[in-house]
Image (cartoon, rainbow, N blue to C red):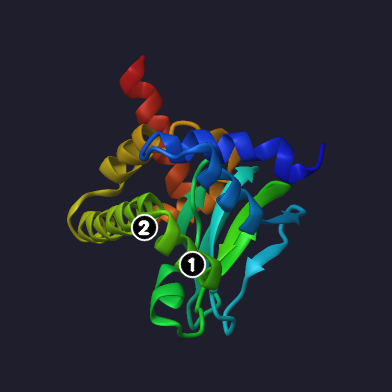
Amino acid sequence: MNLKEQYFPLLERHLKQTIELSEQELHVIYDVIEVIELKRKEYLLQPGQLSQHMRFIAKGSARSFYLDENSQEHTLQLGIEQWWINDLYSYLAQKESTLFIQAIEPCIFFQISRENLERIYQCIPAISTFFREKIQKAYVSLQERTLENMSIDAYSRYQRFIKDYRNIEQRVPQYMIASYLGVTPEFLSSLKKKQLESLS
C-alpha cells in the first residue's frame, strides 16, 4: 500500500464531516492528489515562491512563519493531522509568498494544485462549498487573532491557545509556541507556571 492509499481515508473522513461525496467523486479527488513527504525542518514553501496548492496535513505537524527585518521568527499558524496549511494570500492573490511553511515533525502532505481544484469545482460543487467555508473560517480566525493580540493580555492568549490547540502543545517546541503568542520563551514558561498554579 502506497502513502496515498494509506492516508486517503483520513482526508475522506475529514471532507465528509462537512460535505457529502459519492464514491465516484472521491475517486476524482483521489486521482488529482499529490503526496509530499518531508523530513523534520524541511520546507514546503519559502518566500519568493508562488503558492499553487491547497495542502492537507495527513501525518505530522507543521507551521507557517515569517522573518522580520531583524530575522526574528513570527509563527502565524501551527497545524497537525487533519489541518490545512498554506499561504492563502499568495494562493488567492497569486503573488509571491512572504512565508515559510516548515515541517516540525516528519510530515506527509496531500496537495491539490490550483488548476486541478478549479476543474474539481466544476464537476463536484460540494468541494467548492468545502473550500469556501475553509477560507471564510481562516479569515475569521485571522481577524480574531489580530484583535486578540491588540486587546488581550498574554496570559489570556495562552489560555485560549491551550483550549483551541490542546493536541498541539506537547508536539511543538516551546519557542515556536512563544513565537505564535508573541512572547519570549522565558515569558511563556512563566505563563505555563501561572496556569499550573491556577489548576492546583
Name the image quarter holding the N terminus.
top right
On screen, 135 above or below 195?
below
Secondary structure, mark 2, is helix
Image quadrant assignment for residue 7: top right
Residue 168 in view (yes/no)? no
Q: Indicate which label's residue lies in the foreground, 1 or 2.
A: 1
Q: Which residue is mark 2?
A: 128
Q: What residue is drawn where x is 30% and y is 45%?
A: 157
Please report contact status of discs 1 and 2: CB closer than 8 Å, yes or no.
no
**Residue at the spot of label 1:** 119
Q: Residue furthest top?
A: 200
Among numbered discs 1 and 2, the one appearing first in the sequence: 1
Q: Which mark is residue 65?
A: none
Residue 151 on image: x %, y %: 17, 56
Q: Position of residue 32 (x, y in %)?
A: 62, 58
Task: Confirm whether residue 26 shows in the render.
Answer: yes
